[in-house]
Amino acid sequence: MCDAVTDQTEVGEILSAPLIIEYPFKRTTGPIIGAFLTGLREQVLVGSKAEDGRVIVPPAEFDPVSGNDLTELVEVGPEGVITTWAWVTEPHAKHALDDPFAWILVKLDGADTPMLGALKAPTMDVVATGARVKPVWADEREGHIDDIAHWVLVEGDAA
């Protein structure tokens, strides 16, 4: 037993070395995602047309069934309907809005799949599945998903 204690006390200094992980290259967004981001900057929403005719928003580069490249873009929205939602009573610093809001999945007019967004609404009571919404665009847009500042209910469509 004494030998074990002695061995532990004789262990030398722990060796360490800095580890720097770098990715010294840039990836382009490509023609599909690039078109979506450019559209956001210009206040235009687009989706990609799948081989079966469905319109996917945000656009996909590959068909979810066949895996083949998708190249056809389709303009959608800008309005749509809420397919599901969840109310956030206490937003935190990284949330899109400072006041209570709803995360929504919105299926844009002309689209077959929904996209995620933050709905600014005065109370949870006015939010409903099937309610119509429209985007509120950021004052300064740069081709980023945050170019949609948030969504609001279309006037006269509150639950």
Image (cartoon, grey):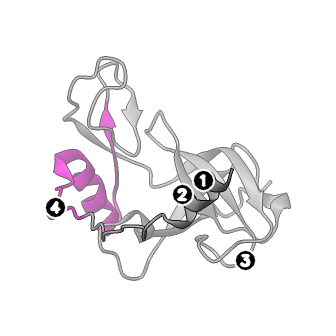
Label 2 to label 1: alpha-carbon separation: 6 Å
Residue 64 versus residue 2: which sits nearer the camera?
A: 2
Residue 130 versus residue 22: which sits nearer the camera?
A: 22
In magenta segment, residue 39: yes
Crowdedness of circle 4 by 10 Å Cα count: few (<14), some, many (20+)?
few
Q: Amino acid at mark 4?
A: Lys
Q: Which residue is mark 4?
A: 26
Residue 80 as seen in the image, left or right of residue 89: left
Give the structural element (helix, strand or loop) at label 1: helix
Magenta span of residues: 22-49
Rendered view: 64 above or below 48: above
The quadrant where residue 137 appears: bottom left
Q: Position of residue 129 (x, y in %)?
A: 72, 44
Q: Position of residue 55 (x, y in %)?
A: 38, 33
Crowdedness of circle 1 by 10 Å Cα count: few (<14), some, many (20+)?
few
Q: Residue at x 61, y 70 (%)?
A: 95
In magenta segment, residue 109: no
Q: Residue at x 59, y 73 (%)?
A: 94
Q: Amino acid at mark 2?
A: Asp
Give the structural element (helix, strand or loop) at label 3: loop
Mark 1 or mark 4, which is nearer to you? 1
